[in-house]
């Protein structure tokens, strides 16, 4: 069992999880490797100089990754950055990589400017998962639209049998679904400006920023499609939520049967949190670093690992140390150092739950309940503040164990291994770490 990343170590070669924002993940059936592509992040702070064009990371075991570099060709990147009379796009966002019909397809977003709803989702293709990728065309285009309509950003592809759908959008008009041509990967109707159907949008009145960073998967064992999304400020209040449906096109509902399209934020799976930490895994990049928990998990992607026959969820997360905190003009907090985090994903009563600890190569066999002292975190539906663990005593017959998965994991906060639980109590997601001797 290994610790997959260290905090306060932002050298991308020594600590490849560093600087991975909006990560996606695929298992390549040809090379039999795991490949992560993410939003552009590079520069001296990461120990790497690179060009704009979707950075990638490669692993043989889903734990130890190697930074590869940008995968778009120079011509493709130049075309994607071209905003006509407006300044060129500074970076590309939220790529999604898949292997279809003997080719690798990379969807990525290019927006007019940060915060703009005028964006395009490009499709680039290659015969090699590490590129170079060449643009095939635009799959979704929201240039010239107003803020009431969707934003062509954050692409994800959902397959329902032989039919393919593009999941995309952000808090402007919500999350949308449009059908793709399986043969080309572009819009089925041939029009990149066709919007498709809204499957999630914020409520009225607005409770918090979002939704955005959506992704979707079908789990045959449960018979449901699951729509994951993030709400909150892209800093310390970001979180991960989910709804489910019997159909790819929705409606996607929460546990109470409320529609994610205007009625519900979805079931909260993870938010900013702080477990007790005696020996957190960290380097020494910034003097004065002190454990401050983890902030803003979000923009996650589910993926099935055919090697382990198990589900995982990859997302970015921020180091909550005070030395990384930045207060914005409006008073909101940002935490500028972020990392890729891969978590095992289990299912309890037909709903996904995420492990409290990142994946470290361990066996994912559920463990029997263990009585004693547990440190628990409860994720309430609407609370976006950092959640701190509290110690409670559980007996072997505690009701929580009946709706949880107990498993072994590497202990990011204390070193070594720990016994974790992830489940549901009173309709809320619960994370736990056993605080006694294993």
Image (cartoon, helix red, strand yellow):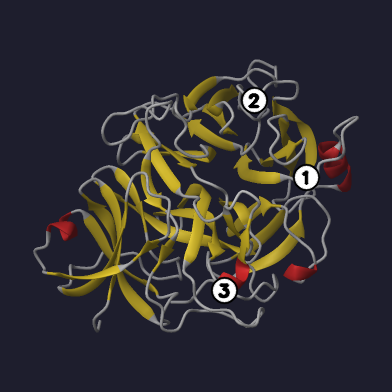
Q: Residue at x 70, y 17 (%)?
A: 191
Marks 2 and 1, how far apart at CA: 31 Å
Q: Are marks 1 and 3 in contact (CB under 8 Å)?
A: no
Tell how many labels.
3
Q: Quadrant of residue 423?
A: bottom left
Q: Which residue is mark 1?
A: 133
Q: Quadrant of residue 66?
A: bottom right
Q: Which residue is mark 3?
A: 7
**In-image side of 192 versus 400 (left or right):** right
Q: Quadrant of residue 49?
A: bottom right
- Nearest to viewer (mark 2 / mark 1): 2
Position in image of residue 110 (x %, y %): 74, 38
Marks 1 and 3, how far apart at CA: 32 Å
Q: List the single residue furthest toward the right.
A: 85
- Numbered disc 1: secondary structure: loop
Q: Which residue is mark 2?
A: 147
- Nearest to viewer (mark 1 / mark 3): 3
Viewer-nearest residue: 247 or 306: 247
Q: List the single residue furthest toward the front.
A: 330
- Residue 28 seen in this snapshot: no
Q: Residue at x 34, y 47 (%)?
A: 352
- The circle drawn on residue 221 is none
Viewer-nearest residue: 239 or 68: 239
**In-image side of 383 versus 121 (left or right):** left
Viewer-nearest residue: 232 or 156: 232
**In-image side of 418 versus 189 (left or right):** left
Position in image of residue 406 (x %, y %): 26, 64
Q: Are marks 2 and 1 in contact (CB under 8 Å)?
A: no
Q: Residue at x 77, y 32 (%)?
A: 136
Above or below: residue 326 compared with residue 372: above
Q: Residues within 10 Å of mark 3 (few under 14, many from 20)?
A: many
């Amino acid at each position: 069992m290994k610790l997959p990343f260290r905090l306060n170590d932002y050298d991308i070669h020594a600590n490849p999880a560093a600087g991975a924002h909006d990560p996606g993940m695929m298992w390549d059936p040809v090379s039999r490797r795991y490949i992560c592509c993410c939003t552009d992040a590079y520069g001296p702070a990461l120990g790497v100089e690179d060009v704009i064009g979707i950075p990638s990371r490669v692993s043989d075991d889903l734990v130890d990754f190697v930074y590869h570099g940008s995968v778009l060709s120079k011509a493709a990147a130049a075309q994607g950055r071209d905003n006509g009379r407006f300044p060129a796009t500074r970076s590309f966002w939220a790529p999604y990589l898949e292997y279809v019909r003997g080719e690798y397809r990379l969807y990525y977003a290019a927006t007019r400017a940060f915060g703009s709803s005028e964006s395009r989702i490009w499709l680039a293709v290659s015969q090699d998962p590490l590129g170079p990728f060449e643009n095939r065309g635009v799959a979704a285009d929201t240039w010239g639209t107003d803020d009431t309509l969707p934003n062509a950003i954050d692409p994800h592809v959902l397959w329902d049998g032989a039919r393919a759908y593009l999941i995309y959008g952000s808090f402007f008009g919500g999350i949308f679904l449009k059908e793709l041509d399986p043969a080309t990967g572009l819009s089925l109707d041939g029009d990149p400006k066709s919007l498709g159907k809204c499957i999630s949008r914020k409520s009225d009145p607005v409770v918090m920023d979002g939704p955005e960073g959506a992704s979707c998967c079908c789990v045959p064992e449960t018979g449901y499609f699951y729509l994951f999304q993030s709400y909150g400020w892209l800093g310390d209040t970001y979180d991960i939520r989910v709804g489910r449906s019997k159909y790819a096109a929705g409606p996607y509902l929460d546990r109470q049967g409320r529609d994610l399209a205007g009625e519900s934020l979805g079931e909260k799976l993870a938010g900013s949190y702080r477990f007790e930490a005696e020996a957190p895994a960290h380097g020494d990049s910034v003097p004065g670093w002190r454990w401050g928990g983890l902030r803003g998990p979000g923009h996650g992607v589910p993926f099935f690992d055919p090697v382990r026959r198990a589900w995982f969820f990859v997302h970015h997360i921020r180091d909550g140390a005070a030395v990384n905190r930045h207060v914005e003009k409006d008073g909101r907090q940002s935490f500028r150092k972020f990392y890729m985090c891969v978590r095992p994903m289990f299912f309890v009563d037909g709903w996904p739950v995420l492990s409290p600890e990142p994946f470290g190569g361990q066996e994912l066999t559920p463990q029997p309940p263990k009585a004693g002292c547990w440190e628990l975190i409860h994720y309430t539906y609407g609370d976006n503040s950092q959640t701190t663990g509290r110690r409670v005593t559980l007996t072997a017959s505690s009701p929580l164990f009946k709706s949880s998965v107990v498993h072994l994991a590497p202990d990011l906060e204390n070193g070594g291994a720990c016994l974790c639980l992830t489940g549901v109590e009173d309709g809320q997601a619960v994370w736990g770490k056993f605080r006694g001797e294993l």
